[in-house]
Image (spheres, helix red, strand yellow):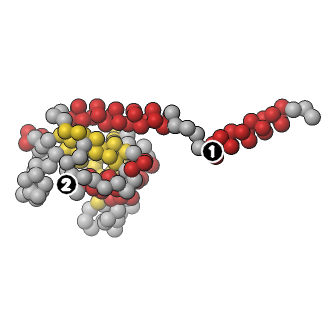
């Protein structure tokens, strides 16, 4: 994993390939409220996917361009060690779903709708849906029509090559 930590040591994130992991901002960090900037930095470093509990996090991630693709219902057998059900009581009685999200640059400033994302029974099935979403996005980017500025630049480059090849 690649680790990124703010200079105060109290905010940061990790990347495992293109998976954004463990975004954190301590309450006493000078960067309190900077989760959006951390996510933007994670994307700039290659982050394209993440998962989180369906608490306040999907809303933060959606504003930074992450789309809820899949969701896995809570399973007590996989609760993190020390999970405090009372602390998260307003999120499905302390048992929030896991939301798997994919980055989409066309969805910046999106609003998260609780419960969105395809419901799956298995985490790996959710990962496969995120993989497919990102692959479809890559294919769409490869098949897009070039912008006029790109075409104009190419025409100018071709003309410059012809001038360079012309002995006169």
The kind of secondary structure element at disc 2 is loop
The kind of secondary structure element at disc 1 is helix
Looking at the image, do the residues carrying marks 2 and 1 touch, with CB atoms under 8 Å apart?
A: no
Q: Residue furthest right?
A: 168
Provide the residue designation for mark 1: 148
Q: Quadrant of residue 124?
A: top left
Q: Is residue 104 left or right of residue 80?
A: right
Position of 21 relative to 7 (above/below): above
**Residue 12 at x, y percent in the picture:** 34, 55
Please name which of the two marks, 2 or 1, marks the residue nearer to the observer.
Answer: 1
Position of 156 relative to 55 (above/below): above
The one of 49 and 135 positioned closer to us in this rendering? 135
Q: Is residue 85 left or right of residue 111?
A: left
**Residue 21 at x, y percent in the picture:** 30, 46
Q: Is residue 13 left or right of residue 57?
A: right
Q: Measuring 8% from the left and 39% from the top, which residue is drawn there?
A: 77
Residue 30 in sight from this viewpoint: yes
The one of 36 and 6 positioned closer to us in this rendering? 36
**Residue 162 at x, y percent in the picture:** 81, 34
Number of numbered discs: 2
**Residue 150 at x, y percent in the picture:** 63, 42
Q: Measuring 78% from the left and 38% from the top, which residue is drawn there?
A: 159
Q: CA distance from mark 2 to mark 1?
A: 43 Å
Residue 24 in sight from this viewpoint: no
Mark 1: few, some, or many residues within 10 Å (few <14, many ≥20)?
Answer: few
Indicate which disc residue 55 carries.
2
Q: Quadrant of residue 51?
A: top left
Query: Which image quarter is the C terminus in?
Result: top right
Q: Measuring 90% from the left and 32% from the top, which residue is drawn there?
A: 167
Query: Which image quarter is the N terminus in?
Result: top left
Q: Measuring 40% from the left and 34% from the top, which residue is drawn there?
A: 136
């Amino acid at each position: 994993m690649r680790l990124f930590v703010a200079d105060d040591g109290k905010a940061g994130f990790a990347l495992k390939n293109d998976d954004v992991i463990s975004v954190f901002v301590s309450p006493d960090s000078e960067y309190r409220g900077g989760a959006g900037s951390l996510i933007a930095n994670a994307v700039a470093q290659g982050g394209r996917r993440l998962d989180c509990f369906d608490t306040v996090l999907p809303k933060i991630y959606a504003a930074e361009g992450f789309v809820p693709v899949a969701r896995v219902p809570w399973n007590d057998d996989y609760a993190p060690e020390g999970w405090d059900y009372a602390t998260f009581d307003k999120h499905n009685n302390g048992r929030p779903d896991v939301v798997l999200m994919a980055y989409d640059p066309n969805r910046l400033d999106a609003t998260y709708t609780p419960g969105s994302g395809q419901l799956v029974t298995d985490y790996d099935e959710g990962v496969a849906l995120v993989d497919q979403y990102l692959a479809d996005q890559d294919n769409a980017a490869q098949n897009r029509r070039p912008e006029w500025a790109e075409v104009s630049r190419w025409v100018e480059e071709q003309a410059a090559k012809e001038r360079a090849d012309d002995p006169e």
